[in-house]
Each structure stands twice: as C-alpha cells, then as structure tokens.
Amino acid sequence: MTEKQKLLLIDGNSITFRGFYALFMQTERFVNHDGLHTSAVFSFKRMLDKILDDVNPDKILVAFDAGKKTFRTEKYSDYKAGRKKTPEELSEQFPYVKKLLDCYGIKHYELKNYEADDIIGTMSKEAEKHGYETTIVTGDRDLTQLVTNQTTVALTVKGVTEIEYYTPNHLSEKLGISPSQITDLKGLAGDTSDNYPGVSKVGEKTALKLLNQYGTIENLYEHIDEFKKSKMKEHLIEDKEIALTCKNLATIRRDAPLEIGLADIDFAGKDIEKLREFYQSMDFHKFLSELNDKKSEEVSNEEELPSIVELTFENIDGQRLNADNASFYLELADENYHTSPFWGFALLTDGQCYVSKDVSLLKREPLREFLENKNKTLDVFDGKKTYVSLKRLGIEAESIDFDLLLVSYLLNNTDNSNDLGQLCQKQGYFGVKSDDEVYGKGAKKEICADETFFEHLRSKVFAIAFLKQKLMQKLKDNSQDHLYFEIERPLSIVLAKMEIAGIKADKETLETMGSRFKEKISDLESLIYQEAGETFNINSPKQLGMILFDKLGLPGAKKTKTGYSTAVGVLEKLRGNDIVDNVLLYRQFAKLKSTYIDGLIKVMDQDEKVHTRYTQTLTTTGRLSSVEPNLQNIPVRLEEGRKIRQAFIPSHQGWEIFSSDYSQIELRVLAHISKDENMQKAFKDDFDIHANTAMKIFGLSSPDEVTPNMRRQAKAVNFGIVYGISDFGLAQSIGCRRDQAKTFMETYFESFPGVKRYMTEIVELARNQGYVETLFKRRRYLEGIRSKNFNQRSFAERTAMNTPIQGSAADIIKVAMIKMQETLEKEELKARMLLQVHDELIFEAPEEEIPVLEKLVPSVMDSAVKLDVPLKVESGHGKTWFDTK
C-alpha cells in the first residue's frame, strides 16, 4: 500500500506573533549587530525544526495575511478593532521570517482581501480531495474547524514548541463538539481577539451547553420559542443577527481564489549556503554551529588531518623543525592571558602536528629557536594573546604572519568570537568544535582527557592553516590587505607591549579614596532614609519605587512586571527633588567605589601595576576597547570620578606621566571627508569650531557674542550631526523645543552644505553597495540599508553616516600608536606608551625626557595621516594621570 503524501500548512502570522510574545521579556536580548530585533525569527525557526521533524512533509506552505483590510472588514467594520498596534520590534521581523523560509526552501504566500486562515482552508480542502494527510500549525483555535480524519490541527499551547494535536476525537473530548460547530461557538460566545461580540451574557460554557442540545445556531433559533422566559432568551432574540454575522465571519473560506496549488509547494529542502549567510546576519551563533553541512569545507576523514606527535622531555631533541612556516596555538584555562594557567599547545608544521600539555617544552630548543626565529613565520588565532602568553614564558615571538581572529574581523566586523571553533563555523568551516562543547562552561569548565584534548588542539591548528589562503585572498580582493599588514597586525604587537608594561596605581591612594567614598555613601544613605521616613534597601528597584511613587507620590511612575522602574532615565526627569538627587548621587558613589576603587585594587599585581587587555575586534567602527579593567571608562564628568586618575602614577621615581590627545578629531575627519569649505576654513584658521558653529546657527557676527550655553548647544549640534541625530534627539540633548532643534539643524546644513551633501551621498553609496568604508578601507556591512522597515532603515542610514567618520578617527590613532612605538624604539628613549583612551595616548617617562616628548609626540601624531585640515594635538604632563590635564 502506497504511503500517503503529507502536507504541512503553517499560519505564518499566528506563529510569528506567538514566537515574539513567547520571548517578550527577552526582546532586547535578541538584537543583531545592525540593531534588528530577532526574537520572532528565532522562535519561528525553532518551531519549524520541531514540526518538520514531527511531520516529515512532502509539501509545505506558510500562509500570511496580506493586510488589515479583507472581505470580513467590509462586512463588519469593527472586525479585529481594538487590537493593539503591532509593536515595531515585531513588525520589522516579518520580512526576515519570510527570508528564513526562502532559505529553508519553503513556499510562502498571501492573498489580497483574504486572511492566512482562508488560504489554509482552501489548500487543505484541495489536499483532502487528493488524499493527502495534512497538518495545520497555528496558535489560533479558529482553525480547529478544519479538522477531519485527514487533517490535524497542531495548536501551539505554550510558546511555539509545545504543541497540542487536534483530531475530531480530541476536539470532541476537549470541548464536546464537532469541528463544524466551532463557528457556531464563535457566533454565540464571541471572540475578544477578533472583536466578535457574540450574544450578550453568553460565555463559552453556556454556548457549549446550547450547542450540545441544538447542534447549530440556526437550529437553536428554530426552537427559540420553546425557551422559557429568561434574560438569556431575551439576549438571544435581541442578538440573533449579531450571532449569525459572527458565525459567518468566523467561518474559514475554503474557496479562496488562490494562484497556487499543490503542484507549487513541494518542499525543496534547505539551501545551506543561504541559511549560513542568514544565520550570520541574524547573529544566530548556536544555529550556525548546528549547520554541520557535509558539503562544506569540513575535513571529511581522519586521513586528511596531520598525525599527532605528543612531545615529551625525552623526545623533543629528536624533532627537526625545518619548515619556514607553522601554525601555532597555545591553550589557556581562561580569557585573561596575563594570569591564566597554561593548558597546552599545538604546533603544525611540514605535515606534522606536535602537541603537549607541558608548555615548558616551548622554552627548549629547537622549539624556542623556531618561535623566535624572525626568518620563519607563525600563523595563529589571536596574535596579541599569543605574544603576551609566550612572553610570560620568556619567548619573543614577533614573526606572526597570519592572525585568523584579526583577518576574520576585518572581512566582517561581526566575526569576532574569541572561540576559534565558533569563528571557524562563521567562515563555513566545521572541523573544529567550540571550547564549550569540549571543556564545558563556567564552573564546569575543565581540561579533558589527553586523547580528546590533543585532538581538539590538532583541529585548531589545522583550521588556522586551512583558512589562511582563503581569507587572505578575500582581504586582497577587498583591497584590505594593507589595513591588516600596515595597521592591525603591527598594532597587535604594540598593544601587547603596552599591556605587558601595565600602569602603576598607588594602592594607598585608592584605599584612601575608597574610605572617603564609603563615608559619603553612608551619609547619603542616612539622608535618603530621613527623606523617605523609613529604612529600606536603596539598591532594590522594587523597594525604591514603592518609596518614590507609592509613599511620596512622585510623578512619572512607570510600571513594569516587577514594580516601578527606577532606571536613570526615569530618575533624571525627577531631578530637583532631594531624595531623587541623593539616590542618583548614591548610585554614582557606589559605582565609583565598587568598579573603580575595589575593582582596580582587585586586579593589581604584586608591583601594584594594572594590566588591562585591549580588544581590537569588539567594535563595529574599529575603535579599541579596554577590558578587565576598563581603563577607557574612568569617569571624567564627575569631579570625584576624575580624581581616581590621581592614583595612576609612574612606575619609577623621577618619572612623570605624559599625555597627548587629538583635538576634535572626528569633526576634522568630517571636514576632510565632506570637503566642506566653511568647516575646513575654520580648522585651517584654528578657529574654535563650536564657537564658529554657534555663530552660524544663532546668526551672530562675532565670537564675543557667543555665550557658554550657545557654545554648548553648538557642540551638541556638531557631534549630533556626526551621529545622525534627529531633531527630536537634539531637542532632548540640549533641552529645547523640537522646532528650535529643527531650525538649528537646517541652519547648520545651510552653513555647511558639504556636510549635507556628504550625508546624502554616503547613504546612497551604502544603499548601492551594501557597506561603507573608512579612509583606510575598513568596512562595515549594513544589511538594513535597503529595508522597507523605517526604523531598521533609519538605523542603517545613521550608521552609514557616522561609521566612516568614527572608523577613520579610530584608524588614525592606531597609525599614530604604531609610528609612536617605532619612534620611541628608534630614538632609544626610556619613555613607554602605557594606555590608549579614545583619542588620547598616555606615556610614562623620565623627567629629563619630558621636553623631548613635548615635541616628539605631537609631531608623530600630527603626521599619522595627511588630511585636508590640520590635526591638532594637545599635551600635558605631571606626577599623576590627573595632573596631565
């Protein structure tokens, strides 16, 4: 007997809505690198996998609503009225749900004037005629009216993966009615979601009782005269037309004029390459790792991998490393490579893979000679991490050629995972497991058995070697090879040396500050308790909200599921109230103490030095990030926060801290890129750019007329334009009316027409090519630039405007750092570069070298790159970092 063919019909709108609200409380966690919300797409994909596995269909169709207006709204204008507007976070995802279906090889369809239900009803009827077994997936119980012996309705009852299957028997057991009576039930009891009123005072329980007795609405009304006099009888008589109308509206049409049929909806199967690209664009890393496609560039059998030789103290001398190049990987127990225990290493060269857990072997010949030999090259995963780690073993490895992490990041700045396995999967190579799979996560992470461990290391070094040619060719094709060879790769070594040097922090100074902050926090606690009239946990948003909004009755309360919101944005609007002002101060001092006092003391080494880690691959603009501790984020606006810099001192007596930073570098880059003559003239004449802008937007004739507040507002306009700010955003920023902000912006663009032209042209360029570049060809891809969704497209357009500016500024200071390190070494100065904080470089140097640095550093930084306007560097020095300003 021939097995029946299977048809799967999915209610696209219903499942997408279900998926979104299943993860509603996590909406902001599901956002990709372009700012697109992805929770509904994520949930839909999970449902799809489950149902495909359960049903194993031959044909599939996903039906969507074509719009709000249908034949039902023509019949009944209040149909679905009162429904809340679809959240923008959800509506922007529908195109991507459909894109997911395209990648899966699944047909999707919508029909003007009809709903998804009608498409499903019509298609299931055709399927029954041809003997198909049909499964309908939906979150809407209305579709259970389509249940037959051949058609099952899979109703999502929790989220999108917990499903209840409705057959005629199950429906009868559940509700005591047949599928055909579902519409009668709707007619009598109504449906709040679709805004069917039904009969007044008749709920589902009463409606089911009536249907069990009379079968249909029509039969009920034929026997209405038999009813005893009652309120229910009055309501039934009064609402007869409403009941019949609701039944008609609830009836799914099975004769919709579809332009497709069963022959058009064969399940084509997944397009793995398209799906991989889609998952990458969505930042679905877990789904990427599951795409272990046999047609990929995966190592298909054991013979293709190099054999493993476990190195020991006894056999190392017998090894001969004659090749000019090797892939090398050093495995550490945790991310902080300055302090992490070593777990082992792998070296792949000349078709042989050497592995060991004993890293002391690296200090022995011929391994040490190989690693330090400048005539040989090393290919690694993370060059800076490798350099610093080997330096801890006393090994200088400055001949790194290929850095897989840096190259992947340059090709696409979302490919920046610190896990080699995950990053390889993004590159379409599935021969390496993620570390979480091999070692476990968090507290459960541990080194595994030797055989598994050595196999994992072998797969890593092989992947580095395997991907090198492919990725380097891509760099060359993108004209980005110079960005790697001249900036990112040499910078990684410069940063490594800065990290190793560290910066000294005076522990006694920090402890004194900590004591002062502790007293201040205690004083603020007392004031807050006094103003509240009781003691409570100030750090508890729930308790604080009850005090502020319930007990004290302050305005602007925003309810959440856990209580009132006491976020900074909410409290800032209540400034001027003593308890609110004190709570904000309390939070500032508490953070200063925990993050910047206790936090710094915690990470000091025995010499009271702090060794931050600079991340080259975190931001989409190319800016460096500082972690554990973040020394780029020490507060500067709050005076008490700025004073934390007093703790940072030179590491030697008779030395000073020296600082140089670029003045208004992003605006200078904007002047260069936009070629705006008025802005360029202001910089060439060394005019105060913010005062210059203030004169233009306020219509002043002299700089003397510019007040401090005017300059502040002009500064906000200058930098707001760089970030693509709206008139609403500018009004919020400078505290003015929206129409005033709009006027400021219009006047600005009239005064700087080149800037307006640049913004228009760069958005158009991004729309045409899908990405923008910095002056040094650093790319940022903008998937949302062609989106029909306004919010997503606007975000991409703002990104297109500011990325070339921010990214070029980041590249310029990187070039300056490389040249600065070269100059310090060439001039044989004792001075050392210690930190990079945005546009600022911090050094320590003997007092006698300070006059040299005052001329040398600005000279090098000024000449880092040639722009149409001069770069300007401001310097300072003193006994502490605080004293340099």
Image: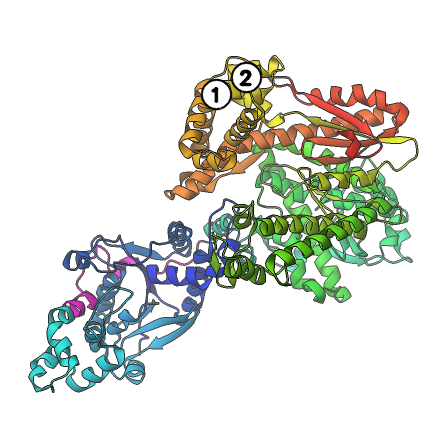
Image mark count: 2
Q: Is residue 758 magenta?
A: no
Q: Residue at x 43, y 57 (%)?
A: 40
Residue 780 as seen in the image, left or right of residue 834? left
- Which quadrant does the N terminus fall into? bottom left
Residue under pointer 1: 698
Q: Residues within 10 Å of mark 2 (few under 14, many from 20)?
A: few
Report the predominant secondary structure element of the magenta stretch: loop
Q: Callout 2, which amino acid?
A: Glu
Image x and y of residue 880, in percent: 82, 34
Mark 1 and mark 2: span between their CA atoms? 10 Å
Q: Is residue 491 above or below residue 527?
A: above
Q: Residue at x 82, y 26 (%)?
A: 824
Residue 428 as seen in the image, left or right of residue 404? left
Residue under pointer 2: 705
Q: Is residue 250 magenta?
A: yes
**CB of mark 1 within 8 Å of CB of mark 2?**
yes
Image x and y of residue 108, in percent: 32, 56
Looking at the rendered structure, which numbered label has been put on residue 458?
none
Q: Residue at x 44, y 64 (%)?
A: 22
Magenta-highlighted residues: 245-271
The one nearer the camera, 395 or 139, is 139
Quarter assignment of residue 261: bottom left
Provide the secondary structure element on which disc 2 rests: helix
Q: Callout 1, which amino acid?
A: Phe
Q: Residues within 10 Å of mark 1 (few under 14, many from 20)?
A: some
Q: Residue at x 31, y 75 (%)?
A: 2
Mark whose residue sits in front, 1 or 2: 2
Provide the secondary structure element on which disc 1 rests: helix
Image x and y of residue 319, in percent: 86, 51
